[in-house]
Image (tube, helix red, strand yellow):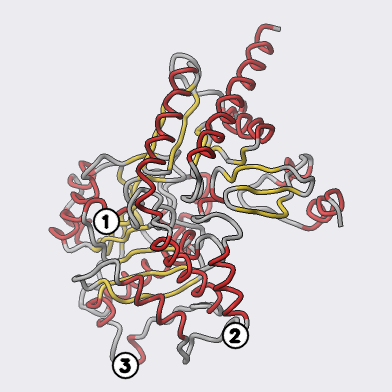
């Protein structure tokens, strides 16, 4: 099949996520066929830098020999067997290595699932059942933060603060209150706090909320508040985990150990669907005993051997290539180059960055937001394709979140492409306004 045949089949049979399909079928999408390092190649042979890590998943680049080799080796043994009633070597090894990131703590039990939504789903269900089995059945509510995103399965979606994603389904999920900042949390009624099972947050930076960066020290304050009130802390590190913010996990930057740590996306280096919910030994203990105390939750592909093999290989690469040690220079370079774009264009309103996660927000000169229907962020991302950059916008915030393996030269290329795209889109817009 060729490009047009693939697109014909897509338009006739496929349904894409977060997409208005009527617009999609009228467009000319890029068909990705190959990848190497931070580069992607389309069906017409054009190459692009993967500027958002294939929706925030890829860590070490595409087609990495070590991960390919680990998957191939496991493929020669067995691809998948049930984790219900059986163990497998790769899952055992991976669970142990994940817990080693939190020595001298009780964060030592790993429940595997398939993706970020299910990692959070596990955490909220565990939190509720834990309370039921420890004499606090009244603690059935949750607290989350405004504009948060924690996935799309019903329990995880209950937590979400983005109306477009969740308002239709709000009444079907868990009872959740949303706060904006620590002062809001401190001002909650005591009775409500006593009904609360857990607080959930994306530590250091919210992804879907246009790369909103939390104040320094806020996570440690949140941990202290939870301890004071007997509320569990769920950290959604689906996006922030595995080096994105500069440390292996965002919570490590403030010395915080959660009650539940939710991981996915970068867990396998971005190669296979796999998620993990890591929790404390005392929480695990509450599920031991009779069958009525067991956690009745699971997936057909829980602890899939291919995914676990990829994840183990990814952790090896972190060590062998000293991935984290190389990040500070890359973070600094990307910040400097993006800051130069903000200085250059009046419409570049603000740069928000945490590690190799950055959002450049566009606004009208003077600071007013663009009319939503103009979709300026989307227009800039579309134009950037012509300069070899693939990324997406959240409203009018351009997200730059490349694989951690990106070189300094490639960071320069990303920012040059973004610079040119902004200049061209707004020059054309100015001409249109004049006419």
Secondary element under disc 1, as helix, strand or loop, is: helix
Residue at 61% in and 34% down? 381
Could you tell which of marks 2 and 1 lies nearer the N-terminus? Answer: 2
Q: Quadrant of the N terminus?
A: bottom right
Q: Which image quarter: residue 80?
A: bottom right
Secondary element under disc 3, as helix, strand or loop, is: loop
Q: Position of residue 274 (x, y in %)?
A: 50, 69
Label 3 – label 1 distance at C-alpha: 36 Å
Q: Position of residue 388 (x, y in %)?
A: 65, 37
| Residue named by callout 3 | 290
Of residues 211 and 342, the one drawn nearer to the viewer in this rendering: 342
| Label 3 vs label 1, nearer the camera | 1
Label 3 – label 2 distance at C-alpha: 33 Å
| Label 3 vs label 2, nearer the camera | 2
Residue at 26% in and 71% down? 107
Q: Is residue 309 positioned above or below 349 on the image?
A: below
Q: Position of residue 102 (x, y in %)?
A: 26, 67
Residue at 52% in and 31% down? 415
Q: Which mark is residue 78?
A: 2
Of residues 289 and 78, the one drawn nearer to the viewer in this rendering: 78
Q: Position of residue 277 (x, y in %)?
A: 38, 69
Callout 1 environment at 10 Å: few (<14), some (14 to 19), or many (20+)? some
Q: Which image quarter: residue 295?
A: bottom left
Pointers 2 and 1 in contact (C-beta within 8 Å): no
Q: Quadrant of the C terminus?
A: top right
| Residue named by callout 1 | 252
Q: Is residue 9 positioned above or below 102 on the image?
A: above
Q: Which image quarter: residue 252?
A: bottom left
Callout 3 environment at 10 Å: few (<14), some (14 to 19), or many (20+)? few
Label 2 – label 1 distance at C-alpha: 35 Å
| Residue 9 located left or right of residue 432 | right
């Amino acid at each position: 099949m060729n490009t047009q045949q693939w697109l014909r089949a897509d338009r006739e049979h496929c349904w894409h996520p977060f997409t208005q399909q009527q617009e999609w079928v009228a467009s000319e999408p890029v068909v990705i066929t190959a990848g190497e390092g931070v580069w992607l190649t389309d069906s017409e042979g054009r190459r692009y830098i993967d500027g958002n890590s294939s929706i925030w998943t890829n860590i070490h680049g595409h087609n990495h020999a070590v991960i390919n080799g680990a998957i191939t080796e496991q493929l020669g043994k067995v691809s998948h067997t049930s984790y219900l009633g059986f163990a497998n070597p790769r899952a055992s090894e991976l669970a142990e290595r994940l817990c080693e990131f939190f020595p001298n703590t009780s964060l030592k039990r790993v429940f595997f699932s398939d993706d970020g939504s299910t990692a959070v789903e596990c955490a909220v269900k565990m939190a509720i059942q834990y309370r039921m089995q420890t004499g606090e059945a009244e603690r059935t509510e949750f607290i989350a933060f405004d504009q948060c995103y924690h996935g799309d399965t019903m329990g995880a979606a209950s937590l979400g603060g983005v109306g477009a994603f969740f308002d239709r389904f709000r009444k079907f999920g868990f009872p959740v209150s949303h706060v904006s900042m620590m002062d809001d949390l401190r001002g909650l009624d005591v009775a409500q706090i006593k009904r609360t099972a857990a607080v959930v947050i994306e530590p250091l930076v919210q992804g879907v909320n246009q790369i909103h960066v939390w104040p320094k020290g806020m996570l440690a304050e949140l941990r202290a508040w939870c301890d004071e009130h007997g509320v569990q802390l769920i950290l959604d590190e689906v996006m922030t985990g595995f080096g994105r913010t500069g440390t292996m996990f965002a919570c490590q930057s403030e010395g915080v150990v959660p009650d539940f740590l939710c991981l996915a996306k970068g867990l396998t280096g971005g190669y296979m669907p796999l998620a993990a919910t890591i929790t404390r030994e005392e929480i695990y203990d509450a599920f031991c005993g009779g069958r009525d105390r067991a956690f009745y939750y699971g997936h057909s592909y829980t602890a899939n051997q291919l995914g676990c093999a990829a994840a183990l290989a990814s952790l090896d690469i972190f060590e062998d290539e000293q991935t984290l040690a190389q990040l500070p220079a890359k973070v600094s370079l990307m910040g400097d180059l993006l800051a130069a774009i903000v200085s250059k264009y009046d419409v570049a309103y603000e740069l928000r960055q945490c590690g190799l996660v950055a959002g450049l927000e566009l606004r009208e000169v003077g600071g007013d937001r663009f009319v939503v229907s103009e979709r300026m962020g989307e227009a800039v991302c579309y134009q950037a394709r012509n300069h070899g950059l693939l990324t997406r916008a959240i409203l009018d915030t351009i997200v730059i979140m490349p694989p951690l393996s990106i070189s300094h030269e490639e960071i320069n290329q990303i920012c040059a492409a973004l610079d040119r795209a902004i200049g061209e889109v707004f020059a054309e817009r100015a001409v249109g306004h004049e006419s």
